[in-house]
């Protein structure tokens, strides 16, 4: 698979997740608005409020079915469930967001993608490539240090074998 194809697939998946988050937020806001409408007027009778709630719930359910149908590709459901609050996913992903950005991969990428990006960047920033200019060599060393620290942080988080013995107590 070529690099543009891979980038297209990664971008498409990321945009699908963002679209799902926005759709779920809109659905939640619509539900809140319909609840406010149902609770606000005291003069309406209970039958009309119940009918309004039923219509709002039906619209939300229809929107969720449409989103699921739109995002289901070859029988695979979307990566982020629509009913999941977007804030929970964002908080979890933001822990190492800076490290993902340093390596140039989407937030939440798997270990193989992170390793491939690290190896590519490490080759590009190898100080031995800049033998003719000491200033460029120092800059490459500084960049390589940042890449190494980001990679180690992500590797520690993503690789289950990394901390396997970290909690052992030896006497």
Image: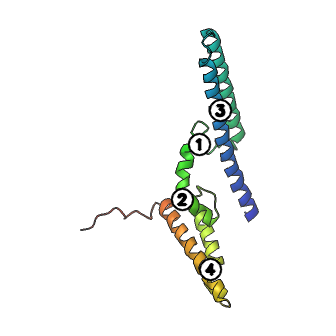
Element type where label 1 sits in the image: helix
Residue 158: % across, % down: 51, 60
- Circle 2: element type: helix
Task: Give the alpha-carbon distance from disc 2 to disc 1, as whole Å.
Answer: 17 Å
User: Relative to 53, does residue 97 appear above or below in the rendering?
Assistant: below
Q: Quadrant of residue 37?
A: top right
x and y percent of residue 116 in the render?
Answer: 62, 68
Above-or-below relation of 166 to 29: below
For the residues bearing labels 1 and 3, Cβ distance under 8 angstroms: no
Return the residue found at the far left.
Answer: 171
- Residue linked to disc 3: 27
Badge 1 crowding class, 10 Å Cα cut-off, few under 14, some 14 to 19, many 20 or more, is some
Precedes in sequence: disc 1 or disc 4 = 1
Q: Dot 3: what SS?
A: helix
Mark 2 to mark 4 CA distance (whole Å): 23 Å
Which badge, 1 or 3, is on the more N-terminal residue?
3
Q: Position of residue 33 (x, y in %)?
A: 64, 26
- Mark number, residue 86: 1
- Where, by quadrant of the figure, is residue 80 drawn? top right
Query: CA separation, marks 4 and 3?
Result: 48 Å
Q: Is residue 62 visible?
A: yes
Residue located beneath label 4 in the image: 140
Q: CA distance from mark 1 to mark 3?
A: 12 Å
Sequence-wise first label, 2 or 4: 2
**Could you say which is closer to the camera, residue 29 or residue 120?**
29
Q: Residue at x 69, y 56 (%)?
A: 10
Which residue is tagged 2?
A: 96
User: CA–CA distance between discs 1 and 4?
Assistant: 38 Å
């Amino acid at each position: 698979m070529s690099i543009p194809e891979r980038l297209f697939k990664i971008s498409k998946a990321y945009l699908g997740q963002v679209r799902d988050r926005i759709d779920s937020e809109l659905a939640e806001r619509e539900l809140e608005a319909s609840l406010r409408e149902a609770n606000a007027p005291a003069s309406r009778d209970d039958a009309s409020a119940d009918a309004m709630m039923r219509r709002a719930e039906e619209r939300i359910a229809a929107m969720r079915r449409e989103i699921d149908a739109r995002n289901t590709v070859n029988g695979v459901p979307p990566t982020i469930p629509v009913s999941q609050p977007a804030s929970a996913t964002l908080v979890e992903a933001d822990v190492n967001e800076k490290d993902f950005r340093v390596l140039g991969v989407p937030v939440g990428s798997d270990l193989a993608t992170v390793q491939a990006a690290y190896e590519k960047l490490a080759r590009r920033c190898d100080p031995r490539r800049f033998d003719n200019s000491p200033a460029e060599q120092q800059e490459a060393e500084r960049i390589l240090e940042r890449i190494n620290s980001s990679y180690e942080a992500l590797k520690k988080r993503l690789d289950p074998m990394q901390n396997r013995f970290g909690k052992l107590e030896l006497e």
